Image (tube, grey):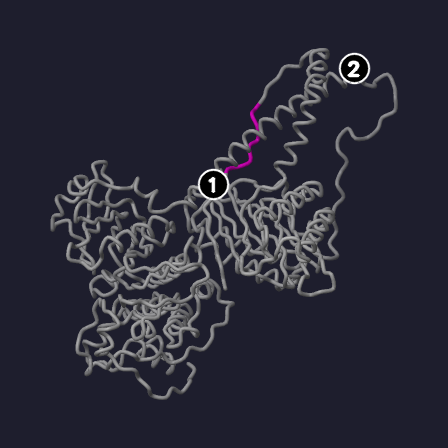
Amino acid sequence: MLIKFSIAYLQRPKASGPSITMGLPSFNLCAMTTLLLLPFLISFLSQTGTEAAATYLYHVCPNTTTFTANSTYQSNLNSLLASLTSNATSSTGFYNTTASPGNSVDTVYGLFLCRGDLSADACRDCAADATKDVVDRCPNEKVAVAWYDECMLRYSNQYIFSRMVTDPSIFMWNTRNISEQNRFDLLVRTTMNDLASGVSNVGSGAKKFGTKEANFTALQTLYALVQCTADLSGSDCNSCLQIAIANLPGCCGGKEGARVLFPSCTVRFEVYPFYQSVATFPPPPGSVVAPVPPLPGSVTTPKGKDQISPLTIIAIVVPISVTVVLFVMGYYFLSRRARKKYNAVREENADNDITTVESLQFNLATIETATNMFSDDNKLGKGGFGVVYKGTLLDGHEIAVKRLSKSSRQGTGEFKNEVELVAKLQHRNLVRLLGFCLAGEEKILVYEFMPNKSLDYFLYDPARKGQLDWSRRYKIIRGIARGILYLHEDSQLRIIHRDLKASNILLDKDMNPKISDFGMAKIFGVDQTQGNASRIVGTFGYMAPEYAMHGQFSVKSDVYSFGVLVLEIITGKKISSFYQSDEDGDLLSYAWKHWRDGTSMEWLDPNLEDSYSRNEVTRCLHIGLLSVQDNPADRPTMASIVVMLNSYSVTLASPQQPASFLSTRTEQSMPLKEWVSSHQSTSKSTPWSVNEASITEVYPR
């Protein structure tokens, strides 16, 4: 089971310490100060070195496999952790070992990896702290992986060496946004790819670590880091890094810094230097490394009349030493305060639920004033559960107000469900909740205002669809995919939207897509893969067959809806238009026919003219058909789809002919519309039939 977690983090550049300007004091005063402070400083520095050795980031230890106290496995684990600590001075910063009594059932496999720029002492300190910390966090689990800023520790009862693993995955990002997002994201991608290529080319068992700097603006520099465990082959290291890099746009696009943590590799970028030295990947075999020139003044000179007296040396060295000590003390206190703030923010984000969003509640008078008493002139549209209005707050801030109708099926439970869900979700491709209002029978949600309304406003209107050139449509497809991936795998909870359609894709001023309307969404546990609905909700055409006919929904149900959306975006045709015209079949059959016959470009929206990329259109059509396959197991995950959209090196499987589970146009007794039903009603009369014709697998030319 793929388990992913997402954590927002606040981080700042390492403090350089206060700027201290001192005059040259007399020797006696400095000597006295040094003698008085020396015992304290020795104790202080020895304690700070230990405390700062391992900065905890995250850990995962599933409780599916546990051991009992004082068992053989625990004894082996203790031996393994002790061995890891004692071998933490390896030149590669990596060490793996096995603890086994001869009984494979109780064998423990473990490894650690230190950040490549750390000294041997710092690596040893981090490994020592990590082996103690992970036992507290995972007291009786056989499998654990823990990430720290300086190192990573991992152990398991299964063989883990020389195997590329990207699960579990941790995504962390800086909360500050970068200017010129597209150019910055491109710089991150190219810099990371260069590093991945260089690191992957080093020999087996060598340190697979590299950093690189690139100028973004005159005042901002990109600092990037990649690293793999030393036991990986070059190809596995490259694959791991490429997967991590491909995930950066979805989780962290437009951020000043971010990191992706996998058990086998890690990538990170910031706009400040976060590593101790500029360490690049090792030079290729056969290259010549220039010798390091001697430091000025390092040559021993013979004694003579020009020799500096010991008293003068002491008078110079002691004040410098005191300055350095004060510098270290200042840096320690500043960094410790920053770490406390970071931990507090992380805990606050983790606890963000319905109790914390109460502070976002608007009073009804404010909403009525903003919408001019819900004037029809302010009406933006009408959805399944109510009307959406444009509002303007007293400070001039524009908002979108979703007013649930008093007769709507969404009761207080569904309303709180949407509030709770959207308040927890923070992603650039999801609509942002600003607040809500509960007053009597009024249930109101307040969102950020989207000036370009929704995707259907442009896509289905002959006069407006011309504004959607291919580059915009492709950006919308990729943005929707990233948003769904966040819901399925990267948010705190696994969320099934269940009502993905063009009218629920809002567009901001830059035509960036944002998924909205979570009133029908379902929350899954991280280990849950499928659910059964007692009430089927959604929209005809977008619902997956297994959900529409049997009430079974999963992440693959949203994948199906995404596939329909992709096909609509490519053709500019609404899925319901096929049942209101004289064209044969449905949108999915229509798409499959052109794919089978190799005439995909004839199927393209004529409004695109020559603005499209043939490769991108063909790939999107391929992904769309893979997503609408009848068997949910055959549909790709959203993680795979995001990789497919971002990398042309990924080979796509051949799609199966999509199932035509809706009735034909002549049999259709009702137009496609939003539909809510119970199993009892659907069991009496099913408004569609299943096409049971045999399927011959064909491939496009």
Instruction: Using a 10 Å C-alpha cutoff, classify the residue at mark 1 as few (fewer than 14 neighbours), some (14 to 19) or many (20 or more).
Output: some
- Residue 14's place in the image compared with 633, above or below, is above
Chain part drawn in magenta = 12-19
- Return the x and y of residue 657 as percentages of the image width and height: 38, 80
Q: Secondary structure at mark 1?
A: loop
Q: Is residue 329 left or right of residue 526?
A: right
- Return the x and y of residue 42 as percentages of the image width and height: 70, 26
- The number of numbered badges drawn on the structure is 2
Residue 15 included in the magenta stretch of the image: yes
> Which mark identifies residue 10?
1
Q: Amino acid at mark 2?
A: Leu
Residue at (83% x, 19% y) in the render = 307
Residue 211 included in the magenta stretch of the image: no
Instruction: Using a 10 Å C-alpha cutoff, classify the residue at mark 2 as few (fewer than 14 neighbours), some (14 to 19) or many (20 or more).
Output: few
Nearer to the camera, 667 or 16: 667
Of labels 2 and 1, earlier in sequence is: 1
What secondary structure is the stretch in magenta mostly built from?
loop
- Residue 282's place in the image compared with 627, above or below, is above
Q: Is residue 344 left or right of residue 683?
A: right
> Which mark identifies residue 470?
none
Q: Is residue 72 left or right of residue 249?
A: right
Q: Secondary structure at mark 2?
A: helix
Location of the C terminus by quadrant is bottom left
Residue at (62% x, 17% y) in the render = 22
Query: To which residue does mark 2 refer?
Result: 311
